Image (cartoon, rainbow, N blue to C red):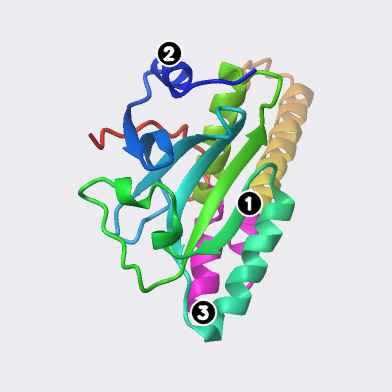
Amino acid sequence: MSIDIETIATFLESHSLKYQIRHSDSGDFIHTGFATQRYENQEGEKHLHLYIVLEENGEFFRVVSPNCYVVPSEETQRALFKTLLMIASKSKMVQFSCENPSQMDFGNALPDDVSLPVDMEWITATVEMPIEDGTLTETQTLRSVFALVKILEYYHPVIMNAIDHGEVDFSIVEQSEFIVDLMNQLLDIEDELAEESSDESGDGIDEGDGALSIESGDDQEEESSSDDFI
């Protein structure tokens, strides 16, 4: 049981996500965009372009972030490819490929404000799944879209570190979260000790919950919203 682009468009509309239906030699596809907190595109903008593509007469579904990174010089390529492979193993659904934008079936349908040098190799991030004789639900569609956004958003500092410095270092994002969790645990213990001390003193003062929380500004998770790129 195949699905069509118009049905997927209604899924996006039900969540107030902005999009355009574009045309290419291989058929129609959806172009949407998201404002980001960490991720920056090659124009230096915190904006992520996504394409939703149907293939095999609507029986194969893909969400694509085309050309999200430029393949660097040979000095740091090994670190980049290893980083992307590790990200794919750490996450669900998201995979990466290296290609030239001129080889993309929908490359000729890029919006006017997106220009891509054809003499470069680029990294493309993709989530894809077969539909075959089944169907694609609204929940599946949105999970695929947001999975791609969140993975690129979360791991962007790690990817850029590999591109710029040739280092594979996930502690950039993971260690900071560990420290935040540890500090929150210590604060909880401190609060418990303070409550015990207060009970023993017999003051009978009820200060409520009083739990403190530390949040890292860089790692603070915010729900991405569809950006108005139209």
Crowdedness of circle 3 by 10 Å Cα count: few (<14), some, many (20+)?
A: few
Task: Name the residue beneath numbered marker 3.
Answer: 165
Residue indicated by mark 2: 14
Q: Position of residue 127 (x, y in %)?
A: 60, 42
Please give the name of the residue rendered at 62% of the width and 62% of the height, measured from the top-left corner: 84
Give whichever of 56, 62 is nearer the camera: 56
Foreground label between 2 and 3:
2
SS of the residue under disc 1: strand
Identify the residue under disc 1: 95
Mark with earlier residue (2, 1)? 2
Q: Position of residue 14 (x, y in %)?
A: 43, 13
Looking at marks 3 and 1 on the same chain, the residue that comes earlier in the sequence is marked by 1
**SS state under label 2:** loop
The question of residue 159 being in magenta is answered with yes
- Three-letter residue code for mark 3: His
In the image, 31: left or right of 194?
A: left
What's the CA distance linking mark 2 and mark 1? Answer: 27 Å
Q: Is residue 174 above or below residue 55?
A: below
Q: Secondary structure at mark 3?
A: helix
Q: Are marks 2 and 3 in contact (CB under 8 Å)?
A: no
Badge 1 density bin: few <14, some 14–19, many ≥20, Cα 10 Å: some
* Region of the chain picked out in magenta, as a range: 154-176
Count of residue discs: 3
Q: Determine the image quadrant of residue 102.
A: bottom left
Residue 26, compared with residue 204, is above or below; it is below
Side of 46 where 193 appears, left or right: right
Q: CA distance from mark 2 to mark 3?
A: 42 Å
Marks 3 and 1, Cα distance to the nearest angstrom? 23 Å
Residue 183, horizontal then vertical, whole percent: 66, 47
- Regarding residue 207, the answer to whether it shows in the image is no
